[in-house]
Image (spheres, helix red, strand yellow):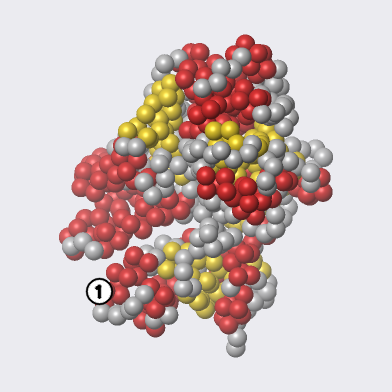
Amino acid sequence: MSEQNLVQIFLKNAELLKGKPCFRHKEGEVWKALSWIEAAERVMKIGCGLQSIGVKKGDAVALYSSTRVEWTLSDLGILSIGAITVPIYQSNTVEQAAYIIKDSEAGVVIVENLDLLKKVRSENKTVSVLLISGQSSGKSVVTWSEIMIQRGDQSSWRKGVEQIKSTDVATYVYTSGTTGNPKGVILTHKNFMAEVGSLEKVLKIEQNYESLLFLPLAHIVARALQFFHLKVGFVQAYAESIEKLVDNLAEIRPHFFVAVPRIFEKVYERIHAQVKSGSKLKQWIFHWATSVGRDVSQRRQQRKRLPLLLKFQHKLASLLVFKKLKARLGGRVLFTISGGAPLSQEIGEFFDAAGILILEGYGLTETTAAINCNRLDGFKFGFVGPVVEGVEEKIAPDGEILVRGPVIFQGYYKKPEATREVLTPDGWFHTGDIGEFDMDGFLKITDRKKDIIVTAGGKNVAPQNIENILKMVPYISQVVVHGDKRKYLSALVTLNRDQVEKYAHSTGISFGDFSELTRHPQIYALIQKSIEEKNRKLASFETIKKFAILEGDFSQESGELTPTLKVKRRFVSEKYKDVLSQLYRE
């Protein structure tokens, strides 16, 4: 398998599966299927079309679009002629996109629509563009419809595909970066093939399964899943948007899907909010069912048999409570996968209690996604699972996780010094994460090495763990913990607007707009009480002594979140440094 390239594995399945559905995507109100053989035809046309506008083997082609079927077809079209795909998040700013296009030396950009075309043109008047959606008579613009009516030389194109080596570069994936400009991670066809091979051993996926993809394909987790789909041969559906995710889940009824923890957190918050607004009887039934489910989950994690009474209670709990949650996710979900950030143990056990197993994994862009993953037949919440096959992993004396294997990147594009900082001559990659193994070889991530807080008293504090605990408060949306070289920890808090407004209405708090609530003394008291309750679960040096409520929630647009909804800790610290300084005034 290591000698193949990514396009060859796709074409092999296209020949085997022919007219069977490969992709599903929505046009208007109708879900359309694209067969494997139709997809292969379109990939060839894109590849030949790119060649016709001057793209050669080894050239970089930027791909600036949200997740959609044309993203995958474009990616394969680029790779099919030996060119290099450079993904750009659709949510990136004009300046960020311009930096990536310039740094990668991309001479062609595939853009999703006219809005993104304007962004590209505002910074670069000369770059050639392939426009997926819409029409433009601008200079150096080729439209998707024009590409699709051309007749490519299939024989010549196929010969070109065969000449691509597994060691050839497939992509530069620019890390979202919490500070400074992003770095281009160089990944080869072989890197992705090794990752796909590892995932095949971890995830037992049948070709008749369907998955729903909604993560940004510019992110390494979604990209690895894309190539996994093309190798295994199940059906991949593309969600219309995050806003329509609930509707799309009900329509596609996927067997599995991949998400970031924030998606599961939002579902969890919504369910608990609905329960809280229900009758006392409904609340009692829910809490009883959850308690039963957690008992079942903990026994499963320990691989213990379930007593007959507990089996009966869990069936009853499923019938009364959990069946509705599974129905919301389409009714066919066998398991889900979480990656990109730490998943709260409490949330993992809750979903497992409901019969929806979340397999948490761990990896980085530099490791071509997963290097650890829980398994269907062996999982523990709060852990990211054992190392995948073919990868070596060890813990350095300072607690940092080090990994080596065929999934490790080739270096940062045009940044040899940055590469040497993280990649040793004998192939060990310094992940920057702190972790530990349990007796069964399951890895637990405790924090980012650079994020560890050392208090004035010399205590080492992992902020992510505290933040995950505080985010379980229904009135809290996001938390960022601070306290490096300080006497105590403080926190910046954003509010869950729906829950706080409901609380205000139910308690008679009058307000004009939501910003008034963020400054209201009764809301401050509510959050203070909630934090004090969570503080009881923490060591004294981990407790939050002071906090500030921010007016608005974090977002990508305002710069606090990455495209995968992770908080940019350093950006937040700098943006709200005046607020933080107030928390440490005596």
| Residue 537 in the figure: left or right of residue 437 | left
Q: Residue 32, located in which quarter of the rendered image?
A: top left
Q: Position of residue 48 (x, y in %)?
A: 62, 22
Which residue of the protein is positioned furthest toward the bottom in this rendering?
586
Whether residue 467 can be seen here: no
Whether residue 8 can be seen here: yes
| Residue 568 in the figure: left or right of residue 84 | left
Q: Residue 21, located in which quarter of the rendered image?
A: top left
Nearer to the camera, 417 or 385: 417
Judging by the rendered image, the residue that carries numbered circle 1 is 506
| Residue 332 in the figure: left or right of residue 39 | left
| Secondary element at tag 1 | helix
Nearer to the camera, 283 or 83: 83
Q: Position of residue 433 (x, y in %)?
A: 65, 52
Q: Position of residue 378 (x, y in %)?
A: 47, 37
| Residue 540 in the figure: left or right of residue 321 | right
Q: Would you place residue 210 above or below residue 164 in this image?
A: below
Residue at the spot 26% in from the left edge and 51% down from the top edge? 289
Q: Position of residue 350 (x, y in %)?
A: 36, 51
Residue at the spot 37% in from the left edge and 34% down from the top edge? 27
Q: Would you place residue 358 above or below residue 390 in this image?
A: below
Residue at the spot 29% in from the left edge and 80% down from the top edge? 510
**Circle 1 crowding by C-alpha within 10 Å: few under 14, some 14–19, many from 20:** few
* Quadrant in which the C terminus appears: bottom right
